[in-house]
Amino acid sequence: MDQRLQRGKLIMAGVQLYDYQLDAVKKMKNGCILCGGVGSGKSRTALAYYYICNGGEIDTEEYAVMDDVGIKDLYIITTARKRDTKEWEGELSPFLLSTSHEFNLYRNKVIVDSWNNIKKYAEITGAFFIFDEQRVVGSGTWVKSFLQIAKRNQWILLSATPGDTWQDYIPVFIANGFYRNRTEFTREHIVYSRFSKFPKVDRYLNTGRLIRRRNDILVNMDFKRTTVSHHEDVFVRYNIEKYKDVGRTRWNPYKDEPIVNAGELCYVWRKIVNTDQSRQVALLEIIEKHPRAIIFYNFDYELDILKNLAYGNDVEIAEWNGHCHQPVPDSKKWVYLVQYNAGAEGWNCIKTDTIIFYSQNYSYKIMKQSSGRIDRLNTPFKDLYYYHLKSRSGIDLAISRTLKEKKDFNATGYAKRYTFTPEALPKAA
């Protein structure tokens, strides 16, 4: 330890934070939710809190060494992508911490793993957990493991969007000891609708108490962005006759068979509008103005289109999705094709000022997180450009309205006026 300690003192300056990060650290406590927008530096702030809790000091000229005897093991539960790209390794280095024993200044254990593996750590005691990209919603395996961990360890949660409804806070409220279990919370605060076929919240009771308890654990980062975001809707054409015909006949022209439910109907409508050639032309026109761009898409058929467009011989194409994990290119001209579900979070890029949304995602949260990939603290760009390709079809306009209201689009609800009983389905010729 002595040799590594001296080495650390010789080469490391003190850990520095922005003022709003330092203010957040002062407000943090065990069991809190650190809430900051995408790109606000939640990871560094969370590690600074761990650092101070274990004897470190912020804003010193030289690196202040933590208590190597009493230092707690650190477990970071994050997305699979953040784990695989080792993004947390970069955040750990200013604190002389590492998942590798060779580069870790201290004797403690540092582990970065994904939410998929949280059950492995349910029996750990006396450690410090950072739960990144909040996933403790509902009552599944992840929540059960989280509650077990919270009983025996210090912990904090990081989130850009901590909760849309009071039900989203139930696991965190239980972990903080506000309620014994979900049943107690339900009994005290939820009134279900009497006329719904499934459990549907009609209203919440004693919301004043809920607000006080949320405020007690929520630490907001007062982050003022220096970037200016420019969002532009780029409207393109679509085959109106084909679109209307599908709604009238409920026939899938791509499979040559009946459409069996509302989800499939919306999928077919979206394929009609997303594959229109005018959308591809509009994309290429944007690329001419912005030679380095991230392009977000939803479906595999969109990827096939995007990979085969004539961007130019000098344009490098790379992709991140469930099939392929390539890094962002370093060339002068490139397009980076990213599937929403695979790449909406857990990485960042300061090599470009442009994101193109080839199609809209149903989730407001995913759209927001996707926009944040280029809006980072260390970006060299002042102006950031976001292009939203969309048609004036019913499905595109409905999705846009829902996202504008900061809600998620419900395909089943949108297409509920169509009947999908076996008697109503069209018969094959």
Image: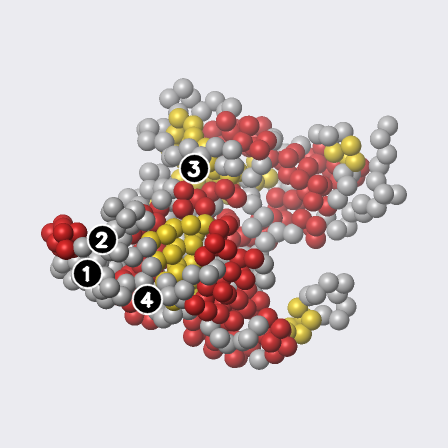
Check disc 1 and report its element: helix, strand or loop: loop
Check disc 2 and report its element: helix, strand or loop: loop
| Mark nearer the viewer, 4 or 2 | 2
Label 2 neighbour load within 10 Å: few <14, some 14-19, many 20+: many
**Label 3 sits on residue:** 294
**For marks 2 and 1 on the same chain, the one whose residue lies earlier in the sequence:** 1
Find the distance from the CA under tag 2 to the CA under tag 1. Answer: 9 Å
- At x 66%, y 68%, the residue is 201
Q: Is residue 296 left or right of residue 334?
A: right
Q: Is residue 9 left or right of residue 204?
A: left
**Label 2 sits on residue:** 105
| Mark nearer the viewer, 3 or 1 | 1
In this view, the residue in front, 117 or 314, is: 117
Q: Identify the amino acid type marked 3.
A: Ile
Q: How is the image coloured?
A: secondary structure
Q: Position of residue 91 (x, y in %)?
A: 30, 51
Label 4 neighbour load within 10 Å: few <14, some 14-19, many 20+: many
Asked whether the viewer can see residue 21, the reply is no
